[in-house]
Image (cartoon, rainbow, N blue to C red):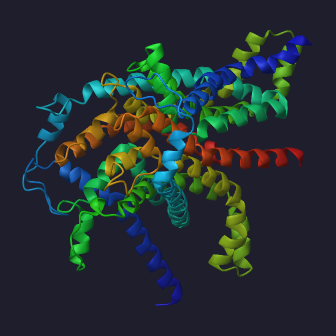
Amino acid sequence: MIYKRWMPLFFILPIVAYTLIFFIYPFFLLLLYSFSDATLYSLSQNFIGIENYISVFREGRVYFYLQNSIIYTVVVSFASLMLGMVFALLTNSIKHKKLQRIFSISLMLPMMLLPVAVGVTWSLSLTEYYGWVNFILEAIGFRREAWLLKPYALWFVMLADVWGWTPFMFIVLLAALQQVPPSILDAAEVDGATRFNKFRFIIFPTLKPVIITLTTLKLIDTYKEFDMLWVMTRGGPGDLSTNINVIVYKSLFNYFKLGRASCYGVISLIFPILVLIIYYFIIRRRGKD
Amino acid sequence: MNSKDLMKCITILVMMLLIVWTILPIISLIIISIAKFGTIPVGFQLPTEVTIENYRNVIFGKGNLPSLIPALLNSLIIASLTTSIVLLVSIWPAYAASSFGTKVAMIAYFLTIILRIVPPTTMGVPYYIMFSKLMLLDTYLGVSLADAIIHIPLAIWILKGFFDTIPKDLEEQALIDGASFAQVLIRVILPTVLPGLLTVTLLSFLESYTCFVFPLMLGRGSVDTVSIRIAGSMASTRVIWTDAAAVSITSMIPVILIYIVGGKYILKGIIMGAVKR
């Protein structure tokens, strides 16, 4: 009996240990250092209370960084979801099997690129002289611009991110679409349902759980975005495309302020922890049902 | 032309647009990567002189452009190490979550959500402090231990999905018939979850091959991965686009190889990670 009772504990021991060592302990370390004036070189700390927080909030840029993070996360997640949906619906409507396969493989190509390479691809595309974006814009009568040096550079990084992540959404949604029984769709067509109604009343409800998990997953992952942003703009021009992750990195490795970086780090955890609390209540409610 | 034909035309037009939107950036990347340095084509022009010199420089290095080979080796070592850690840590809770009822499953779920949700740049800060005390800075082990945390959640979710497909009756029957736990493990459990293990292995290998944040924050040059090399080509104020493009394309090779070998499993893993929860 004892064996049976303690067995589960034994099994979750590795993940509990890993979480303790690589999440809980570092988290408190982060919290501790956020109250100190430690630097990258001396790691030793003098406690200065909440001075880091006071100066960070008094400077006020942190609101802007958080705003950038949130805009980036929401826009990229929903845009790549929508686009992925369009990709999937169109691909699914191709009747010819071989053509469908070729089509979906070519739509998957951006997945083969590393995230930083996606950054390179779009930096190149957006350059003033070599990029195809400017080439097209000039052809239809606009001026050439170095888009990544513009104040709204963040939106172009978002564009790159959407481009890089749509294939992922596309694959999952296509797989889910193919689970929708065609007999129901045929029956609906016989009953005179329009294309939109078929989507609204049959396809969308079937896909809803997938869409919800996919969106949650994407929101979580996009909030962590750093790679492409760093490669494409380094948070620039100035700090206009800096999100909360970039400022954490910059505080530590460009300004060598460990205390300050920890402080930004703690602030960056506000939204994830909020999401976690919401998620916890959802799970608990689901558990009760 | 009736409305149905018009609809068809529009659909085909939209499809063409999607293909162009997806492939055009890659084509421009390829074109630049084979252009001779100094004669970079503008827009859609083809390069006046085609050369493989950029790729030769990527492989062997030239001047202050370092060779990609050490970075590639680093990436592969880190990816293998990370994948081993991920498998070692995530098999147990996945099995527990699948076998021992909802409470344990919920604890495991919750822990994995926590691990997944935190930005790596933020975790990099305390890791830097921890690892500098443990002498783990600038080591493969340090980067892998940190990087594994990103991939463990998905691994647990996927593995749990595979464990759920084990016929429980068979497992219990075998135990009643006097089979030892080890026998059950090898004869019943392992064959069912082997595809799952393969999926998780390929998926975390692929993802950790691309790792960027942790080698950047916890390394000082000797663990530079492929991603760091690519980002490095963009770091100077005058970017050498031919090099940046050639490096980006060369770095795809392992990814494409993995997709060719195990694309079926990877796609299954990706879909399972999002669909079944």
Image: A248 above or below A162: above
Image: A80 above or below A283: below
Q: Nearer the viewer, residue A111 or A122?
A: A122
Instruction: List x then y, in percent, for residue A112.
Output: 39, 44
Image: A283 above or below B130: below
Answer with the quarter of the image where residue A29 lies. top right
Instruction: List x then y, in percent, for residue A224.
Output: 51, 45
Q: Is residue B260 left or right of residue B168?
A: left
Residue at 44% in and 38% down: B259
Residue at 85% in and 14% down: B175
Q: Is residue B117 left or right of residue A259?
A: right
Q: Residue furthest bottom?
A: B1
- In the rendered image, is residue B82 in sight? no
Residue at 26% in and 73% down: A137
Instruction: List x then y, in percent, for residue B21.
Output: 37, 63
Q: Nearer the viewer, residue A173 or A260?
A: A260
Answer with the quarter of the image where residue B159 lies. top right
Q: Nearer the viewer, residue B244 or A256?
A: A256
- In the rendered image, is residue A140 in sight? yes
Q: Count the numbered circles shown.
A: 0
Quadrant of the frame with the C terminus of chain B = top right
Q: Residue furthest right?
A: A1
Instruction: List x then y, in percent, for residue B46.
Output: 14, 59
Q: Nearer the viewer, residue B45 or A229?
A: A229
